[in-house]
Amino acid sequence: MTRTEPVGVLIRRWRERRGRSQLDVSVSAELSTRHLSFVETGRANPSRGMIERLCDELDVPLRERNTLYLAAGFAPVHPERPFTDLGAARAAVEAVLAGHEPNPALAVNVRWEMLAANRTMAVFLQGVPEELRTPRVNVLRATLHPDGLSRRIVNLAQWRAHVLRRVRRQLARTAAEGLAELLAELESYPAPEPSPVAAAPAEDLVVPLRLATEYGELALLYTMTMFGSPRDVTLDEISIETFFPADAPAAELLRAVAAMADEPAPLAESVG
């Protein structure tokens, strides 16, 4: 999306992206269908309050809400601070990451660029080549690139398909700049042949990430946590990825890996 487009065009695009009709949105946002039609076609200018109601109804990300405000001639509402300047929110992220040890955990932005990681995760990322770590680590690139962690993923075909679905959903939900290019890059990496041996057993509750290590195979489950009711653009785009052992051998292995992390790793990288 560009800021040169009229606000009505942007509103219509988000409504269509969410698969909502004018009638449905207008009823939920408490305005007439005729008025919404006039806004979308440029025959009426939305107020700041109307933009806020429509953005809430259409679940528009904060970064794109600022774009709508600018397109309508208003000042942006939501600030954007570097991760290092998020105060209590940054402290909360670091507390979650440190408290999750000996299991790996990291915080990423909307494009899966790493903002922070705990010491266990830092150990796993040590094997990623330097060219995949600069200017900052993109965890999906580092995971699926042929020279990255993909060489150690036992169920690579299964995990790759899962990751690509996640990126497509993220792109559809946020329309974030750079995500389409990241998706195209990830899809361009050589696709492995599905392996019956590496497929998840039918009784598995979720798709695990299965890594081959010098200590044996490591099976991990993950969860994703986001801040509720963010007002800052950076905070709106942060998610915390926490990994858990999928079985008892994995738990024991993670404790051994965590013991290797003698020196604390830097918890945060400024992303400007």
Image: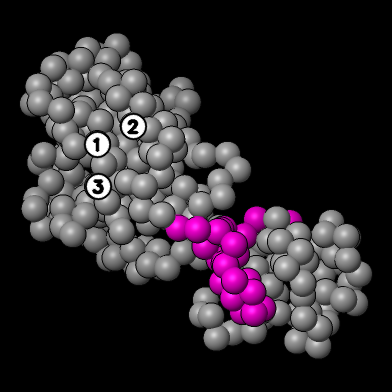
Vertical position of residue 178 compared to residue 102: above or below: below
Question: Is there a contact, CB below 8 Å, between mark 1 and mark 2?
Answer: yes
Residue 238 screen position, x and y as percent = 43, 46
State the residue position of label 3.
269
Say left or right for 91 vs 268: right
Label 3 secondary element:
loop
Local crowd size for mark 1, using a 10 Å CA cut-off: few (<14), some (14–19), many (≥20): some
Residue 205 screen position, x and y as percent = 47, 26
Quadrant in which the C terminus appears:
bottom left
Give the mark nearest the N terminus, 3 or 2.
2
What mark, if any, has residue 267 been given in the picture? 1
Local crowd size for mark 2, using a 10 Å CA cut-off: few (<14), some (14–19), many (≥20): many
Residue type indicated by callout 1: Leu
Residue 221, can we see it?
A: no
State the residue position of label 2.
94
Give the mark nearest the N terminus, 1 or 2.
2
Q: Residue at x 29, y 55 (%)?
A: 271
Q: Give the range drawn in magenta.
A: 57-80
Q: Label 3 to label 2, Cα distance in Å?
A: 12 Å
